[in-house]
Image (spheres, rainbow, N blue to C red):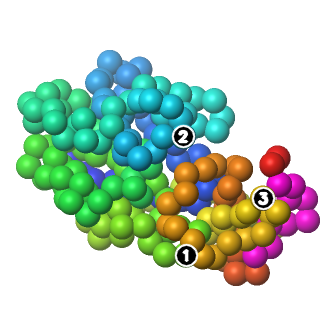
Amino acid sequence: MAQLYFKYGAMGSSKTANALMARYNYAERGQKTLLVKPRMDTRDGDHMVYSRIGLSHPCIYFDEMREMAESALQENACIIVDEAQFLTREEVRYLVHLVDDCGIPVICYGLRADFRGELFPGSYELLVMADKLEEVKTICWCGKKATFNARFDADGKVLKEGEQVVLGANDKYIGLCRRHWNAGDLGPDFKVGK
């Protein structure tokens, strides 16, 4: 029976690498998958998903998937969505339709909360609608589990205000435990631009 999965974690927890490995596992067994991401995620170039450890694979954008016939979507053993926090409520409901009415398993990977500690709209809807929730873990500089995404400026100051979406990776964000996120403490070895 098809299910909707939401695998969430802080920055640096290997969510994208996990998505690409899941796609590879299906392909290795001769099963077709569809790798999808929201169009607003432009960091990796056109129609590509890249992980920090160097894995990559071509993808389609979510709006392009929406234009596909359901019969074409059903040819896939699974749909894998990266950067799912950027989905809208309506887009998550579309994924629910694909799972419940079309029988297609969907695995979503994304952040749970933004740099302010607030849920992304897509994450909120996935937390409500997903059949299975799984945390992809990483650690803070202190060794505790990182659950918060700290955004920092060019001087290494942790920001708590601003637009919810500013695309970036290690150059703008780092995963921290709650204590160090609250304190705005990036750690004794943190260097801007490393």
The residue at the point 55 percent across, 52 percent down is 167
Q: Which residue is mark 3?
A: 154
Q: Nearer the viewer, mark 1 or mark 3?
A: 3
The residue at the point 39 percent across, 56 percent down is 86
Answer whether residue 72 is magenta in the image.
no
Which comes before the other along the chain, label 2 or label 1? Answer: 2
CB atoms at circles 2 and 1 under 8 Å apart?
no
Q: As shown in the figure, which amino acid type bears the numbered disc 2?
A: Arg
The residue at the point 29 percent across, 60 percent down is 88
Q: Nearer the viewer, mark 2 or mark 1?
A: 2
Q: CA distance from mark 1 to mark 3?
A: 21 Å
Q: Is residue 122 above or below residue 116?
A: above
Q: Is residue 152 above or below residue 45?
A: below
CB atoms at circles 3 and 2 under 8 Å apart?
no
Which residue lies most toward the right here?
A: 188
Dot 2 falls on a residue whose secondary structure is loop
Task: Tell me where the magenta segment starts and ends, as one range.
Answer: 184-192
Q: Which residue is mark 1?
A: 117
Residue 76 image label: none
Residue placed most toward the observer, 44 or 5? 44
Answer whether residue 188 is magenta in the image.
yes
Q: Which residue is mark 2?
A: 43
Q: Is residue 159 above or below residue 135?
A: below
